[in-house]
Amino acid sequence: MRHQKFEPAYFDEAVETMPRGALRDLQLLRLKETLNRAYRNVPHYREAFDALGVTPDDLNTLEDLTRFPFTTKNDLRVGYPFNMFAVPQEDVVRLHASSGTTGRPTVVGYTRDDVDVWAQLVARCFVATGATKRDIAHIAYGYGLFTGGLGAHYGAERLGCAVVPMSGGNTEKQVLLISDFGATIICGTPSYVLNIAEEAEKKGVDLRGGPLRIGIFGAEPWSQALRQELESRLGIRAYDIYGLSEIMGPGVAMECTEQCGLHGWEDHFLFEVIDSETMEPLPPGEEGELVITTLTKQALPMIRYRTRDITRLSVEPCACGRTHARILRVAGRNDDMMIIRGVNVYPSQLESVMIGVEGFSPHYQLVLQREGNLDSLTIEVEANPGIDPAHYGAMAKQMRHSIKSIVGVSTRVIVLGPGEIPRSQGKAVRVRDLRRKD
Ligand code: DLL
């Protein structure tokens, strides 16, 4: 087993390298407790279990979980705001909520122990990247109801980093503080941190040559090409962190320094991948929808929560020594998938091609339209500064060709001038869907 020198407090070798058999025993024990807690305390779960004719006593092995019902975002909406909680209100110490583009937000709650476990797990994530208490962590995830800012904050602080709670926005000031405070870790959505990198370059501030060394990026899909872009523009190693508010927030899974998939923390969560059509579980290695069951959450236990995120699971040993299963980078959600003339495409697949084409900035937007019975896709991309607009036509042709040959879809490409694509302030809005006419 090969580990780097981890910060001892938050690299718990006994847990993170636990043999898989022992890990499964621990999961079974915790799963039984969770099912019981949910069944006893949450009317929704009692009804859903009763409807399928199961009780927590029917779980004797981890495989028996497939007999239990799924939970969806809609269940949380119906239970708005607190009806899915399994503890009395007085035991809740924190509330967060997803923005929800339409209607009511999804509300999630935490007990003191939940907040504590969350901080521990985010600290564990930081340590997986080689972070230590000597680091200065600049947090550019939004603070507030979104779990990104406070989630990263508590974890970094728990590890002992000096935390700069910058939040999102005010990009000029971000650059100033990263540079003046000598931040060594930057956390934010990859699209927003790209915006910060660009602002630094514009202002002539050299973040590349400074002490910044680690990026902890997540909350939206991002490609390997964007990773390379961020790594080279900021002089860092960029790591993927995954999570969702319904399950906890950031820190459900994290890449280690091997950068080959994200370790899902299986002592606190149980991961399944299912076929979204048949709802049947898929074996490791097969692509499908990620389903997560919480194993220790008190305020809001989630049984078989359908994330809508598409990934694959690997239980192969990782060179870092950790035994916890890895989820592959999440390329997209099943509700983000576009079907362009019969070809299924995720925005991040297009991103990996677009970033490789010379002469373009890594900013883009995808415009979906309907032509007759077919969906059509227009890609708006931005030329790098200093290119004569007379060349834009040829550049568009080159981009169209690269996308057609690698992804297999025909697109229309519009090349815009530098700065013309709106910049991300948090989670990037990549797709403008003009198909839904009011
Ligand atoms: O985005 C929590 C988070 C904050 C994760 C900061 C990582 C860093 P929600 O706002 O509830 O929570 O959105 C969750 O975002 O179901 C995925 O679709 C997407 N997502 C989160 N992390 C990643 C990632 C936070 N690393 C939803 N890669 C999830 C791809 C991600 N998608």
Image (tube, grey):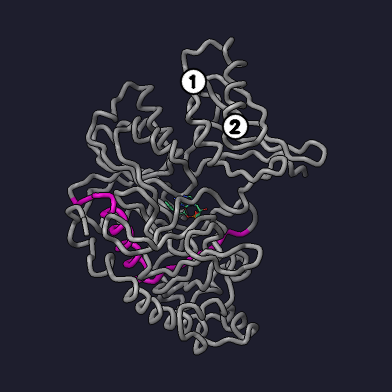
Question: Disc 1 or disc 2, which is closer to the eye?
Answer: 2
Residue 276 sits in which quadrant? bottom right
The x and y percentages for residue 11 are 23, 61
Q: Is mark 1 within 8 Å of ligand 1?
A: no
| Residue closer to the observer: 22 or 196 | 22
Residue 76 x %, y %: 58, 67
Instruction: Using residue 297 as the reference point, say whether residue 11 is left or right of it.
Output: left
Please give the name of the residue rendered at 61% of the width and 80% of the height, measured from the top-left corner.
Answer: 48
> How many neighbours does mark 2 have within 10 angstroms: few (below 14), some (14-19), or many (20 or more)?
few
Q: In the displayed structure, would residue 341 be above or below residue 97?
A: above
Give SS at disc 1.
loop
Ligand 1 is within 8 Å of the C-beta of the residue at disc 2: no
Magenta residues, start to end = 104-133
- List x then y, in percent, for residue 158: 25, 59
Q: Do residues under tags 1 and 2 come within 8 Å of each other at their CB atoms?
A: no
Q: Quadrant of residue 128?
A: bottom left
Label 1 and label 2: CA atoms lie apart by 19 Å
* Residue at the spot of label 2: 405
Residue pointed to by mark 1? 359
What amino acid is labelled 2 in the image? Ser
Q: Quadrant of the C terminus?
A: top right
Name which residue lies at 56% across and 74% down: 83
Residue 324 as seen in the image, left or right of residue 136 = right
Mark 1, Cα crowd under 10 Å, few <14 / some 14-19 / many 20+, is some
**Residue type beneath disc 1:** Gly
Can you give x and y, in whole percent of width and height, for residue 126 in the image?
A: 29, 53
**241 drawn magenta:** no
